[in-house]
Image (spheres, grey):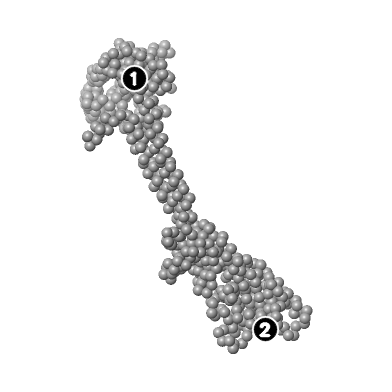
Amino acid sequence: MMWMKQKIGNISIFPKLIITFLVITMPLFTLSLVLNELGKQEVKHQISNSITTTIHYYFLSLEKELERIIRTQQEFINDEDLMELSNTFTIMSNYKRTKAINDLKLKLTTLKDSSSYIKDISVYMQSINGTVSTSNEVDTPSTREEAEAIARATYTSGIPITVWQDRLYLNLTYPLNLMNRDKNAQFPLFIQNIELSMEALTNALNSFPQDGGAILFNENWTIANNKYPQPLAEIREKLASTVQQSPAFTKQIEVGKEKYMVVYEKSMFLGASLLFYFPENVIVGQLKTYGIWFWLLVGSSLVIVILFSYGIFLLIHRPLQTLIRRFRSVEGGNFNAVLPSTRQDEFGYIFNRFERTVLNLKTLIDELYVQKIRLQQSELKQLQMQITPHFLYNSFFILHRLIKNDENETAELVSKNLGDYFHYITRNGLEEVPFEHEVSHVRSYVEIQNIRFSNRIFVDFEPLPGYFQGVMIPRLILQPLVENTYEHGLGDIVTDGRLQIGFAAEADRLYFSVEDNGIGLTEAQMAAMTGKLTSEDEGETTGLINIQRRLKLKYGERGGLEIMPGTMGGLLVRIYIPNDKGE
């Protein structure tokens, strides 16, 4: 493994560029190939489902249509004109005979026109020894034998569809039980024959999608659209066992070297089956074209990768050589070898910025030392601020007075807060602490001061909002601000002193605010204090200035102090820190 890494590391940039582009593009090509195959399978599946649905819909529609025709045919038994002609023809006047025949023919024509699957409708009546049909008026008596033959064919070719002389019929005799297998049975009053249009059925088969072969058949008759007739016999032979087991299925069959998709469905009502088949190439032919285009895209992409890599090599190799020479010059300690570039492209920008960086490097190093010294001074001042003898004296004096006056509970509270206070400020191991720890330290300090100034100063200390939890800040940054307010803002207040401590968020910053109702500052004093906060004079050592410098060293321009007149008549001071937790 190490040998391979070293080998790759010794390869020049041009082969590396080619390898890099190939490593990047090969997963995309592989993913595209997989998606192409998945898409092909999904398209085949969708087309198969669509064809299956179409076949089922056609077969169901044909079944419903023939069921409607048969139901209407059966309703003709109660037709007034038909019954009158069949039973009272001999006693009817010529006018009534003609009118009844015309009315009957009109009804038959209406039924014929209601479906494209009906070619002709005829009714043979024994009473008139003739046939009324939609194609002529009354046939010769010889039609009795034809009507009888069609009716008797029902028992040999099945129901509801009867085949006779290669024609399909829907038959009805009345009475229903008078036309049976016995040739000597009494002849019925009438026989109604509805001839189905084989042309309409064939046209329906031709309307199927995918331009495939289709046949509608049973054991006695077959209607086909004559598309792809060659494989039909072999397909039916291979499906023989499957047809016996399932009334409907979709299957792939291989005939010779050709694969066919076959959809089969059987109707128990019609006693017939529908078989639709088409070459699989009809589906995947266009998809194969997309596959060819995909491989052309892969080949073109490889050529483009090589040409693009070579172009990048030419564009970056020479400028990099120049840049490397300048880096080596700086590495040797020559910070004065400034050679501005005349290039106007990105490398020209890099060269100029590099030279400017070299020129500013000394200054940056000097500033780094200055900041380090300033940080050390700030830390020293912080340590000097940690324990003020005056606060320590006052705290012990308060504790002494409370114990002397037997105010044990208050003395216990003071001693606890005093212990927490000194424990926190003497723990030097951490440079940053969570915001809630710093606030807890401020509360301990305020609790002690509340007892000291119980009759002079009243404190409103807001609870810490949840979004301050976990925010890290410099240690001992908040308490000196509160202490400064007690000493300077409220130092001259004899009674009704007010101190308000709050928290809030502003854009991408959080702030801690302290406001008092002291005498405040004049405009001149406010301007002078603001100037000191923005000054870099190391001679200034006041509490607010120390806090400001610590914040600037930590956060830069995103942190710091801000002083302004307060709403209570005194001074409002805010400490801003970045809200990196919420970004």
Q: Amino acid at mark 1?
A: Thr
Classify residue 103 by image quadrant. bottom right
Which one is in front, 541 or 555? 555
The x and y percentages for residue 510 are 37, 27
The x and y percentages for residue 433 are 28, 28
Q: Give the residue drawn at x 54%, y 72%.
A: 221
Q: Secondary structure at mark 2?
A: loop
Q: Secondary structure at mark 1?
A: helix
Q: Residue furthest bottom?
A: 184
Q: Give the residue drawn at x 34%, y 13%.
A: 338
| Vertical arrangement, residue 451 with respect to residue 191, above or below | above
Q: Are marks 2 and 1 in contact (CB under 8 Å)?
A: no
Among the two numbered marks 2 and 1 on one chain, the one whose residue lies closer to the N terminus: 2
Q: Nearer the viewer, mark 2 or mark 1?
A: 1
Looking at the rendered image, the quarter that the N terminus falls into is top left
The x and y percentages for residue 574 are 37, 23
* Mark 2 lies on residue: 126
* Mark 1 lies on residue: 322
The x and y percentages for residue 263 are 47, 63
Is 133 displayed left or right of 412 in the figure? Answer: right
Classify residue 540 by image quadrant. top left
Q: Residue 332's mark?
A: none
| Vertical arrangement, residue 37 with respect to residue 1, above or below | below
